[in-house]
Image: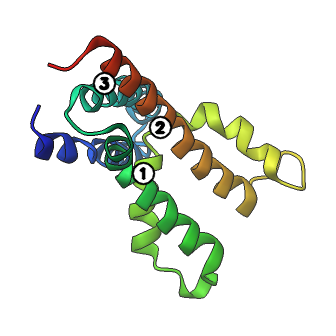
Amino acid sequence: MKKPVLIALTFVPVAVGAVANVTLALPGIGSVLFVVLPLLTTVFWAWLGARYGKSAWKPLPALLIGNAVGIVSLLVYLWQYLLVPAAAQNLALVTAAQLFLDAAPLYLLGHLAVLFEAQPQTVGTASMAAMHVLSFVYMAVVFGLGFLWGRKTGRG
């Protein structure tokens, strides 16, 4: 697969996150898509990691390029959410940064994220930041496993 196509495909989780956010308000189908889309994205992300593993790129650049959208999304989100006062936050930036991370199965990761709060069973700043970090780590691990599988099965 050509490198520009591989790079373009790294934006698929952003599109999936956008669809998941928009359809969540739809009765019935929104809940189904909220569960199914992240699972499909996980499979796709592992497949894309394998394609990167079969590419001619060296491992470190391939992993960084493959996860660049996620890295930028996470950094922008943490910058806006943790370092910028609420009144000065750019809502468009926060929303755009959130889309990549919404492609991960938040319903599974949310149980871990609340463990970072001082108050039990509370969703606050710490759990929201943890949710985004956990989502990125999840996506990076899935991509990395796919990458290793692609390297193992050879180039082609």
Q: In this picture, is 123 found above or below 151? A: below
Camera-side mark, 1 or 3? 3
Front residue (pair 151, 104):
151
Amino acid carrying mark 3 in the image: Ala
**Image quadrant where residue 128 sits:** bottom right
Q: Residue furthest top?
A: 153
Marks 3 and 2, how far apart at CA: 13 Å
**Image quadrant where residue 56 sits:** top left
Provide residue 131's location: percent of width, then percent of height: 63, 48
For residue 50, the mark is: 3
Q: Find numbered disc 2 in the image and state the secondary structure of the residue it sits on.
A: helix
Say which residue label 1 marks.
70
Within 10 Å of disc 3 (Cα), the crowding (few <14, some 14-19, many 20+) is many
Camera-side mark, 3 or 2? 3
Amino acid carrying mark 2 in the image: Met
Say which residue label 2 marks.
139
* Mark 3 or 2, nearer chain start: 3
Tell me if I can see residue 124 in this picture: no
